Image: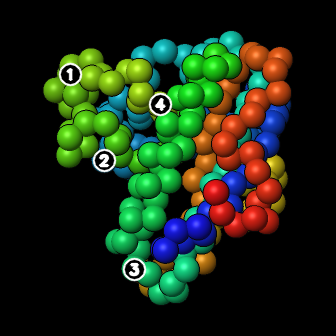
Amino acid sequence: MTEKYIIENFTAGIGVDEYISRFRDEKRFVEFCRQCPNYGNSWGCPPFDFDTGEFLRQYKYAYLMATKIIPIEKGIPIDKSQELIRPERIRIEKELLELEHRYGGRAFAYVGKCLYCPDSECARKCNRPCLHPDKVRPSLEAFGFDIARTLSELFGIELLWGKNDILPEYLVLVSGLFHNSTENIISHTKRNPDSGNL
């Protein structure tokens, strides 16, 4: 728990083939991505220069993480959302890279602007290679996964949206690791969600 919010962490495992067949609709979700200013302007976003389905199918397992951020105060304006999200993104993305290093595979981070370039000015805008390929990871949405359905069916969590420019009761960040490891993955987020803190 911090002074501003409470964290609840959840994990779920699913076979990649099943996750693709039940939760992926690339055409639909990439169309949503097209409406975002990051589309084609960030190395973590579509369009990609490779077959994403083929890329995903090189892995057998998906280890998914949901991080629920519950603001302590009510009535927080939506434009303050990054004050809650950014610290958790930094923590989660560091953890994802540690998991990738330990178990192999490929991490998928939370959708949003890159955390690694100054002022979020991606080198892709200048037709240059990514400056941080060791750190930048795409989101599950960028590869066509339905996050609302993932949350609902695999975690039992409803995806909420803000109303009247006010944040909802909670926010949820969804990320994961696609891998081939037969080890039982242990992450820092794998803890009792009822504890309400890290």
Q: Please state which of the two labelled residues, at mark 3 or mark 2, is closer to the viewer.
A: 3
Determine crowd level at label 4: few under 14, some 14-19, many 20+ residues with C-alpha closer than 10 A.
Answer: many
The residue lying toward the viewer, choosing from 59 and 185, is 185
Q: Which mark is residue 137?
A: 4
Q: Residue at x 56, y 37 (%)?
A: 95
Dot 3 or dot 2: first in sequence order is 2
Q: Residue at x 49, y 36 (%)?
A: 94
* Quadrant where the image shows the C terminus: bottom right
What's under tag 1, amino acid-wise?
Answer: Asn
- Residue 157 location, x and y as percent? 74, 62
- Separation of disc 1 and disc 4 at Cα? 18 Å
Q: Is residue 16 visible?
A: yes
Q: Residue at x 27, y 23 (%)?
A: 131
What's under tag 3, amino acid-wise?
Answer: Pro
The residue lying toward the viewer, choosing from 144 and 123, is 123
- Residue 178 location, x and y as percent? 67, 25
- Separation of disc 4 and disc 2 at Cα? 18 Å
Q: Which mark is residue 127?
A: 1
Dot 3 or dot 1: first in sequence order is 3
Determine crowd level at label 1: few under 14, some 14-19, many 20+ residues with C-alpha closer than 10 A.
Answer: few
Dot 4 or dot 3: first in sequence order is 3
Asked if 6 appears above or below 132 in the picture, the reply is below
Which residue position is annotated with label 2?
A: 37
- In this image, 27 relative to 182: left or right? left
- Separation of disc 4 and disc 3 at Cα? 28 Å
Dot 1 or dot 4: first in sequence order is 1
Q: Please state which of the two labelled residues, at mark 1 or mark 4, is closer to the viewer.
A: 4
Quadrant of the rendered image containing residue 26: top right
